[in-house]
Amino acid sequence: PQVIRREDYTPPAWRVPEIALEFDLDPARTVVRSRMQVERAGPGPLKLDHGGQQIVSIRVDGASAEYRDEGGRLILDLPRDSHAIEIVTEISPEANTELMGLYASGGLLCTQCEAEGFRRITPFPDRPDVLSRYSVRMTADRVSFPVLLANGDRVGGGDLPGGRHWAEWRDPFFKPCYLFALVAGDLKANRDHFTTMSGRKVELGIWVREADLPKTAHAMQALKDAMAWDERVYGREYDLDVFNIVAVSDFNFGAMENKGLNIFNSRYILADPETATDADFDAIAAVVAHEYFHNWSGNRVTCRDWFQLSLKEGLTVFRDQQFSADHGSAAVERINQVRMLRAAQFQEDAGPLAHPVRPDSYIEIGNFYTATVYNKGAELIRMMATMLRPERFRRGTDLYFERHDGQAVTCDDFVKAMEDGGGIDLSQFRLWYSQAGTPKVKATVRQDGQDAIVSLEQTVPSTPGQSDKQPMPIPLRMALFGAGTGAAEAGERLVVLDKERADIRFEGVGEAPVLSINRGFSAPVIVESDRDAAALALLSAHDDDPFARYEALQQLMLDTLIARVEAGAAEFAPVVDAVRLTLENPALDKAFVAEAVLPPSEAFIGDRMATVDPEAIHQAREALRAELGRLLEGQWRAAYLGSASNRFELTPAAKGARRLRSIALGFLMAGGAEDAPALAWDQFQGATNMTDRQGALAVLANSDAAQREDALAAFYARHKDDALVLDKWFTTQALSTRADALEQVLKLSQHPDFTLSNPNRARSLVGAFSANQRGFHSGEGRGYRFLADNIVALDAINPQTAAKFVAPLGRWRRFGETRGALMRAELERIVAKPGLSKDVFEQASKSLI
Ligand code: DPP
Ligand code: ZN
């Protein structure tokens, strides 16, 4: 397959200022007529990407035209500087299992065009730097498809003979074709409105199947909150008279920011207390906000080419993170963001698929919707914001939006706007966009008379294709605390480590102070320090930065668990004491306590070890959980009973209480409290909301309790008709920490409700299981074979989603010789498969290197 390189970028030879599309919609056979006005922008023929659909006719200025087909591209040599092109094609939405382009989902017809799906609808220069004004006319059966939606505003519609009807939409804004969307179906709207800061009224609609209407209130509130927030925090106002969202059940991504017509995976819209957990509610608000924010960071200002994907995604993730922090517990939000970054992005950065935030090459762009582009990209924006401080950061974003409105630009254009608007030199900072790999910072403290000197040293590891790295500017928020007292010795300072080494002097501090570093996780790096258990315990009890406090306890647990795995023994006492103090500290809120007392995940422990022994890690972590459960039984019981709720509320306090309740239950179970299984069963049975019910189910599913089977069966019986909840049933079992998880998963893959053709369901079992470190690596390679079999099977249906499942096999170097060889063998088997998609080929072949 062909490799696309960033350095080969050339501007398009032809612009397409206007396009009028006509869809004669039918699930089996849809006719698409495209009329484009094209204008020459440079030398060369007109190149139209196409997705292999049937071409009925191509006419240039009214006459049938000559064209050649060069590997998926139609080439038209055009004599003049401006032409009218008309193309008629035929597509079959119901045969489209890739879910890219126009496809059918649960009786609806809908589109997904990012990144390169538009070409599967009609031949077009399918690249984000070709901006057009769209008008869209749809005709369809009136009974099956009473609602017809597209981007922009509805400008007309009416009935037609033969039981059909039509509607026409126009979008006044220039946009790239990846933001095109249409939806046809039997949908009902939750309608509301929002008045913008300049007093314009915007009609809002969330379109779902009628039965799902009661589950749209939370998403609607999130949308209105997001609209108000973007005005307040970034000065960004919405620009059309309508904003529609549609929920569909078959979707490759989480959601899509099409101009004025967002299309969502239903899991990020539908929620009520009976079927959605608190985490689901939070994810819905975050994704609704994310897609809405794209209207400026992505749509008004878009990407020049797909190498610049982080321009819109990194910035928009950062914006949705800020939104979530402002609407909940900022500390817990940050903890969750970092947990996610470490679980997905640090692993990616440390493996064969490592790539810079702005990649240099790809085979299939679908493979670059990654944690690096999204989440590390967001951390880059955060570092700039930290160095600039809020006011100058805002001047930078104002300049960015003003300067580039209506343009398709690069990551470098964003950085330049930050420099010009914020007044800062970011020349060296640009390395963060081009160098892959997670930097390591070594930090040590020594005394120098009355002063303390913090010595910092950075290294950036080599990654595939990048061996020689330069030092990057790393903004580190740090402070010092008195060793005996825990009192602040030196107030917080922002130090930018921009060389390989630096010594930072803190003047006039007491004896042997304790270093608090990377507070708030100010930089996406791994810090290695020589802080011992006592120092970490001190920070865990006294640090005034909540993230640093969380981090200290995590580090203490991590050091302890690694020592346990490596040396076979380690003192648990310091961890037990630190957890006790955290549980007994009345100044801490429950949401924070719940996150702080959780030991690092098995995968995260593995990431810090040279060779991962999943079973040893599991045993060590379980031993710690058992000890904590046993020795702090009274505290867990108090936390459990003190967190009962009688009324469902979505406040941070109520959510924190529910979280702590299920975590306390888990520790009581781990500690072997005799009544724990009964408590779990009672919580499961008596739950008035999904958070409590699933929390109890997970505790039981991980246990040998007699109630386990009953709980799983009851959950299934109660929710079997709700696909999103049934996904949870699969996931809970796929993530089970029990020794038989693999056997259970193999069985579940034969369950009548399991299917690969729905991406959510595929992810709920296959994707979830590959993240279960103990289960996936058990069974002498049978877990690997299960994953590979499913990748190959799914590749025939939906290559983009299949390719997302490859990464866990690519971690073969980390799991020792025996496991490594078995993992490699599966990758080789995948690569050898005839007819493999380029999506899976790229991920599997790169994973072998
Ligand atoms: N652009 C989408 C998002 O991340 C993904 N297709 O919002
Ligand atoms: Zn996005």
Image (spheres, rainbow, N blue to C red):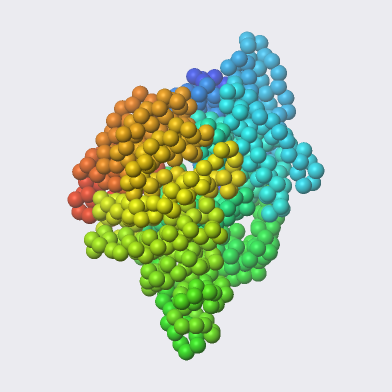
Residue ranking furthest to the right: 199
Name the residue at 52% across, 51% down.
Answer: 591
Q: Taking 282 as reference, is 723 left or right? A: left
Residue 677 position, x and y percent, is 36, 39
Q: Splitting the image into 4 quarters, where does residue 345 fall? A: bottom left
- 398 shown above or below 483: above
Can residue 6 be seen at all in this image of the molecule?
no
Label count reads: 0
Which residue occupies 50% across, 88% down?
450
| Residue 315, image x, y percentages | 58, 53
**In which quadrant of the rendered image does the N terminus lie?**
top left
Residue extending farthest bottom: 449
Q: Quadrant of residue 330?
A: bottom right
213 w.r.t. 462: above or below = above
Residue at far top of view: 162
Q: Nearer the viewer, residue 430 or 738?
A: 738
* 679 left or right, relative to 143: left
Q: Position of residue 556 (x, y in %)?
A: 38, 64
* 513 or 761: nearer the viewer: 513
Q: Give left or right: position of 95 versus 807.
A: right
Q: Position of residue 669 (x, y in %)?
A: 36, 45
Looking at the picture, tell me which residue is in the foreground, 479 or 482.
482
Q: Residue drawn 67% across and 23% down?
A: 167
Q: Residue at x 22, y 46 (%)?
A: 822
Could you tell me if residue 452 is visible in this image? Answer: yes
